């Protein structure tokens, strides 16, 4: 509410000469000024009446001297997302059983801690390698991202980010691949190898197939077919 104009007193008439009736005799000073408190209160009440009920409410709020103020309740900014789908990764034997004619499996190291800059997850990796001298080889590396705080979706977000990063340099999306959320042939810039990157829930996997001599060019079409077989077996083993 805008305050009314300040009350201003008009110019006071000069005191009459000594001896005028109704004024004190010389030596008593001027008469006391009349109080304007009643006039100020009247102006304020008049303004309130003109402004109506809304003005009254505003006046009451503005005149509250309790020092308290209302504030909106804080809203929660907690991140939410899908729960972690997996708590562990499959063994290499389970993956190998899904592909025929693989070279012998090298002794796997099992699940190990993996480095990450993400403080919201627990990150581990597991590798499986099938090799034989003079024959094509296959390597599967899996990463498990477990959210430190359940219900935040941090695990799946990190797995998706790994896939997106691998495909950012160019690649060919695979429309469907077993149970994978997304998969694609990613560019590893090697004529003697081919690669598939996938993520499935909070697990990501890299499948690399190499020729008998990785430094020499190979038939990329045949390489991709073999990589696809290993990738499908990996997705099925993840579950």
Image (tube, grey):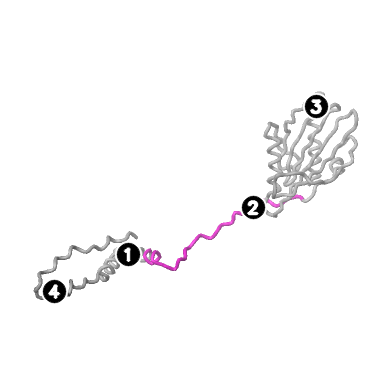
Q: Magenta stretch containing residue 69, yes or no?
A: yes
> Which mark is first along the chain, 2 or 1?
1
For image coordinates 63% across by 52% down, the residue present is 79
- Badge 2 marks a residue whose secondary structure is loop
Left or right side of 16 for 72: right
> In front: 83, or 154?
154
Give the image quarter of residue 188.
top right
Find the distance from the CA under tag 4 to the CA under tag 2.
89 Å
- Please state the extent of the stretch shown in magenta in the rendering: 58-86
Q: CA distance from mark 2 to mark 3?
A: 43 Å
Instruction: Please name whichever residue, 149 or 200, is drawn nearer the observer in this view of the structure.
Output: 149
Residue 36 in the magenta stretch? The answer is: no
Residue 199, horizontal then vertical, whole percent? 73, 42
Q: What whole-number distance in Å separates the C-alpha atoms at marks 3 and 4?
A: 123 Å
Give the class, few, some or many, for how many residues have Cα within 10 Å of label 3's Cα (few <14, many ≥20).
Answer: some
Image position, residue 145 (x, y; %): 74, 47
Of callouts 3 and 1, the N-terminal one: 1
* Residue highlighted by disc 4: 26
Mark 4: secondary structure: loop
Name the chief secondary structure element in magenta. Answer: loop
Q: Residue at position x 90%, y 32% from top? A: 132
Q: What residue is pinned by disc 2? A: 80
Residue at 77% x, 51% y is 87
Q: Which residue is mark 1?
A: 52
Q: Which residue is mark 3?
A: 192
Q: Are marks 4 and 2 in contact (CB under 8 Å)?
A: no
Q: Nearer the viewer, mark 1 or mark 4?
A: 4
- Disc 2 and disc 3 in contact, CB within 8 angstroms: no
Determine contact: label 3, label 1, CB under 8 Å.
no
Q: Position of residue 67 (x, y in %)?
A: 45, 66
């Amino acid at each position: 509410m805008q305050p009314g104009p300040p009350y201003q007193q008009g110019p006071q008439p000069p005191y009459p000469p000594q001896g005028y009736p109704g004024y004190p005799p010389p030596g008593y000073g001027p008469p006391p000024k009349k109080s304007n408190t009643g006039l100020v209160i009247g102006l304020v009440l008049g303004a309130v009446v003109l402004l109506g009920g809304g003005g009254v409410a505003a006046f009451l709020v503005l005149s509250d001297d309790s020092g308290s103020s209302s504030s909106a309740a804080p809203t929660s900014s907690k991140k939410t997302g899908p729960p972690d789908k997996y708590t562990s990764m499959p063994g290499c034997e389970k993956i190998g059983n899904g592909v025929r004619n693989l070279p012998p499996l090298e002794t796997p190291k099992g699940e190990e801690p993996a480095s990450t800059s993400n403080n919201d997850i627990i990150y581990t990796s597991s590798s499986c390698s099938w090799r034989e001298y003079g024959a094509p080889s296959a390597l599967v590396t899996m990463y498990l991202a477990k959210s430190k705080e359940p219900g935040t979706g941090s695990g799946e977000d990190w797995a998706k980010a790994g896939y997106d990063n691998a495909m950012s340099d160019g690649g060919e999306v695979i429309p469907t691949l077993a149970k994978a959320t997304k998969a694609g042939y990613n560019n590893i810039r090697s004529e003697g190898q081919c690669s598939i990157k996938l993520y499935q829930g909070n697990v990501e996997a890299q499948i690399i197939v190499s020729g008998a001599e990785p430094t020499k060019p190979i038939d990329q079409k045949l390489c991709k077919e073999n990589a696809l077989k290993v990738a499908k077996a990996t997705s099925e083993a993840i579950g």
